[in-house]
Amino acid sequence: MIQDSKLFISKIEQLAILYDDVKTLILLNENIDVDHKIQIASLNELRNAFDHLMRAVLNPEVIDKEIDYATDHLCRAGFDCYELIATNIGKSIIDIINEYRSSMISSVFPRYYQVIRHRLFESRSEIADIRKRRRSNSTKKKESFKEYDNKIKELQEYYKELLDIRPDLDRAQSKSLKSKWLDRIITLMIGIVLTTLGFILSNFI
Amino acid sequence: MVNSYKIFLKKYFGIQDTMESDFKKIDNNTTIDDFDFTFTRGNPNLIKQNIKLPSESEKEIESYLSMELP
């Protein structure tokens, strides 16, 4: 068992900061998930990290190695969450956009086609790239963490922007529906008038 | 959801099984039948419904990455 508790605490301080970040991501992911499901992959990584922490207590001679392993597992838990958060925000943006006609989006929210759509496309490639790199290069895990964080923040900004503009999109959609119905009624009335006129002309004149 | 979350944590972070855990236990091939809910409190079916397996998460990510943008 560990003899110097001060040394142990100093060793796990960084781990505690990382854990706090990962825990926030796990909770955010659960809140953002459409089905509000618990994601097992990241919880399993936390469990594995806990295993290494306990091993470090029981085997102080390998404390550095065990804490490195625990850090790796925490990073993986974070990656899993980041990927699902990005996926959920991206899907939410696409779902909202799909509710409106492209002509309406172009007129009410032109930024979608000018900037956001392009950035969504790029960010997916970037996420796929980080996924690929983080699996092949274990030494740069913490750097990938920052890259993911930037992507999430960017996607969150777009999502917020879309939510802010949504009432305008709804108003435009409702206005367009009203005008469509009005057009149909006018066309129908003209049709009735013309048919009646035709009937009168053919039968009485 | 909160309840099943706590039950899951209790079951899978339990000290008695932690030190001997198999690191490959939960992976993309894990199915819901791999979990033992015998001693969990509450309705096991409800808990199962609230769990997202690693394979499901992977599929979601892959489907988003290949989704056509409107």
Image (cartoon, grey):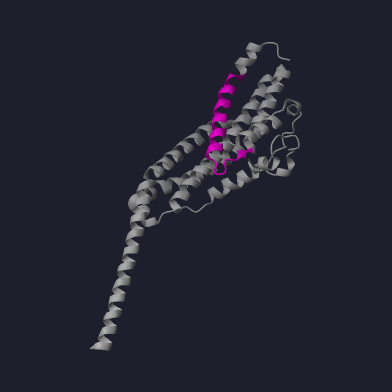
Above-or-below relation of A121 to A101? above
Magenta highlight range? A12-39
* Residue A36 lies within the magenta run: yes
Say which quadrant the C terminus of chain A sits in. Answer: bottom left
- Of residues A107 and A127, the one nearer the viewer is A107
- Of residues A64 and A12, the one nearer the viewer is A12
Say which quadrant the N terminus of chain A sits in. Answer: top right
Q: In which quarter of the view is residue A53 placed?
A: top right
x, y percent for residue B25: 73, 37
* Residue A119 lies within the magenta run: no
Above-or-below relation of B14 to B65? above
Q: In which quarter of the view is residue A178 placed?
A: bottom left
Instruction: Identify the residue at horizontal 29%, vertical 84% (top origin).
Output: A199
Q: Can residue B30 be seen?
A: no
x, y percent for residue A117: 42, 49
Instruction: Identify the residue at horizontal 42%, vertical 39% (top origin).
Output: A157
Left or right: residue A107 compared with residue B25: left
Total numbered labels placed on residues in the image: 0
x, y percent for residue A96: 45, 49
Q: In which quarter of the view is residue A159 placed?
A: top left
x, y percent for residue A128: 54, 44
Q: Residue furthest left?
A: A205
Instruction: Identify the residue at horizontal 30%, vertical 79% (top origin).
Output: A195
Q: Can residue A58 be seen?
A: yes
